[in-house]
Image (cartoon, rainbow, N blue to C red):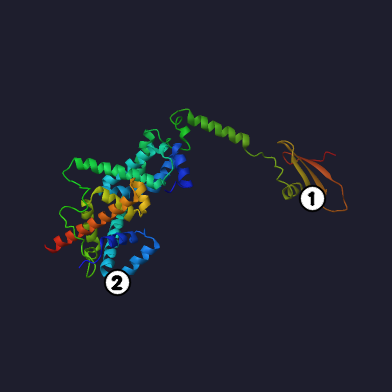
Amino acid sequence: MTTTTEDTRVLLQRYRDGELNEQQRRYIEGLLTWNKELAAELAQLDAMGEALRHDTQEQMDAQDFDTLGKNLMERLQADGLVRPPRRAFDWLSGFAWRPWLVPVALAVLVAAGLTFWPRAVPEPQDNGAVLRARLGLNDCVIEYVEAVNSAALVFEAKPASEEDDTMTVIWLFEGGEKRDPS
Amino acid sequence: MAAISDSEWLLLERCRRGERKAFEELVSLYQRRVFGVAYGIVRNPNDALDLCQETFLRAFRSIGRFKGDSRLYTWLYRIAVNVSLDFVGRRKRDSTVVFDETRQVEPELSDEWPSSAGGLGPVEELDRKELMQVMSGALEKLSPKHRAVLVLREVEELSYEEIAETLDINVGTVMSRLFNARRNMQKLLQAYMKGESSR
């Protein structure tokens, strides 16, 4: 025998959908404790909802959305709604076929190498221990180092002893020749 | 009515500027859900995928007119529902299937509520795989508008207010449409069970 009214069924669905106020919710929960027909109907609704979600989920998982996105972007681009993708070296593509490109690129590389290759003369950073070892100034402290040009290096050598406050300025020319300007 | 969130607004602004990455983000965010809505209505995955693409195309073409007075997903769902209902309407014109939206139950079914007294109803007696097949068959017999309201509630889990906004109907209509859709589903399932048991 059917005891559940149409109004109660409406409330049951709204209860399941979380659309009842507190008082209505308590009323339906009270009914569900003893009305087996209503409880069974709720279980049916749950099973239907679950089946529908599961079916849709399965279909979603089976789709190739990457292709969808790609096709969509192509159509949007054709419509002028999106800008075409920019690649980092797109500007080079116009030159790629030109026969003079390779020799010119090589010449540029060689010129850059000649300009920026490190010189034979030690740089200012090449101080202290290296200079002392090279010049045999074992008892000195190197105070100041400066590369004057590509051919010479000037530095001050101060004796290690504190009593001796004399300072020697030494020019070092390419090839290792030492010269004291004083 | 819930308005668009700040992050959604920023994304839309980037789309309006024609930023490809923003379009890709938007599609990636909502493609599955839009597909789900379309599939729920047309019940064919290939058609649903085409309609999903059509939904985004229409959305992007009219993005400048979107004022942001609803959430982005309800706007997209609205387009998806309209595109899908149009599709079903065109298909209906080309076939002999007749959906009678004004009638609450399918013509061949009784007006009595399916009884579930004395234990669980027919739905619970089926195993999952069988249930899917039965459900699928029953859903195809529902009207497209009933399918739309069911999928928005059961799959997308929208509130009545959000469904009303998406379908551009009032909340009362959502409730009655949902109620009748579920009732028809139960009756169709019961009819199926009776047919199975009489074999």
Q: Look at 70% across and 40% down and name the residue there.
A: A121
Task: Give above or below for A124 relative to B108.
Answer: above
Mark 2 Cα within 10 Å, few/some/many (few <14, many 20+)? few
Examine the rendering and report whether any part of residue B130 can be seen: yes
Q: Position of residue B93 (x, y in %)?
A: 19, 40
Nearer the observer, B161 or B157: B161
The chain letter under disc 1 is: A
The chain letter under disc 2 is: A
**Secondary structure type for disc 2:** helix
Mark 1 Cα within 10 Å, few/some/many (few <14, many 20+)? some
Task: Give above or below for A127 relative to A42.
Answer: above
**In the drawing, does residue B130 fall left or right of residue A69?**
left
> Type of residue at label 1?
Val
Q: Picture quarter containing residue A70? A: top left
Q: Position of residue A48 (x, y in %)?
A: 27, 59
Q: Which residue is mark 1?
A: A141
Q: Which residue is mark 2?
A: A34
Q: Residue furthest bottom?
A: A34
Nearer the observer, A153 or A135: A153
Of badges 1 and 2, nearer the viewer stands: 2
Q: How many marks?
A: 2
Examine the rendering and report whether any part of residue A65 can be seen: no
